[in-house]
Amino acid sequence: MVRNAKFWTIWVIATLAGGAVLVAGMFYGGKSRANLLIGATSHGHHQIELACNACHTKAFGSASDMQNACMSCHADDLKTSKDSHPKKKFTDPRNADRLQKLAATECITCHTEHKPEITRTGGVTLPVDYCELCHRDVGKDRPSHKDL
């Protein structure tokens, strides 16, 4: 019994110490914090990859929290680039059938971070042919989308 108690005491102490090292690394690790990332950031976000709280504003935030974080940096860019996917297009009741298939009111539906193996131009992480369901001739209509 005493031997078993010693084992569990050592196990608990080691677990707590390991956890403390991880937490300290997250908050005070500097460049070494990159080792804690779940995946590399996209090219567009490489400059803030160690500032986790720039996007992750709440520990267990909702999709709405993430959307607010995206818009806090990208709202002006979307206005000046004449965003072809503005939120108002997808909140229009005439597009309700499309919203059942695609939660297009949130950036993270198409732009998921920390997934370098599936990230394409513009940080898009959906399959190449995904958009063709609605946009078969988008390359003809928009030269900027020719090779997407």
Image (tube, rainbow, N blue to C red):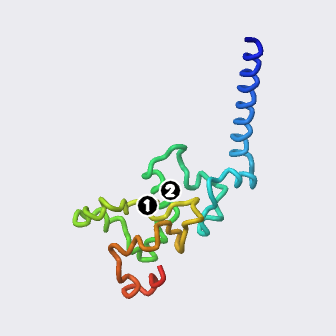
**Neighbourhood count class around disc 2 (C-alpha, 10 Å): few under 14, some 14–19, many 20 upward:** some
Seen at 55% across and 68% down, the residue is 119
Amino acid carrying label 2: it is Ala
Q: Are marks 1 and 2 in contact (CB under 8 Å)?
A: no
Looking at the image, residue 52 sits to the left or right of residue 109; the answer is right
Residue tagged by mark 1? 109
* Residue 59 image offset from top left, x and y in percent: 55, 43
Seen at 38% across and 82% down, the residue is 138
Count of residue discs: 2
**Neighbourhood count class around disc 1 (C-alpha, 10 Å): few under 14, some 14–19, many 20 upward:** some
Q: Can you say whether 90 is above or below 2 in the image?
A: below
In the image, which disc is placed on residue 23? none
* Dot 1: element: helix
* Residue 97 image offset from top left, x and y in percent: 25, 63
Looking at the image, residue 56 sits to the left or right of residue 142; the answer is right
Q: Nearer the viewer, mark 1 or mark 2?
A: 1
* Residue 82 image offset from top left, x and y in percent: 41, 77
Q: Can you say whether 145 is above or below 106 in the image?
A: below
Name the quadrant of the N terminus. Answer: top right
Amino acid carrying label 1: it is Thr
For the residues labelled 1 and 2, the Cα–Cα distance comes to 14 Å
Residue closer to the observer: 114 or 107: 114
* Residue 23 image offset from top left, x and y in percent: 69, 40
Looking at the image, residue 133 sits to the left or right of residue 72; the answer is left
Seen at 26% across and 66% down, the residue is 95
Seen at 73% across and 16% down, the residue is 5
* Dot 2: element: helix
Residue 48 location, quadrant: bottom right
Residue 121 location, quadrant: bottom right
Residue tagged by mark 2? 69
Pick whichever of labels 1 and 2 is earlier in the sequence.
2
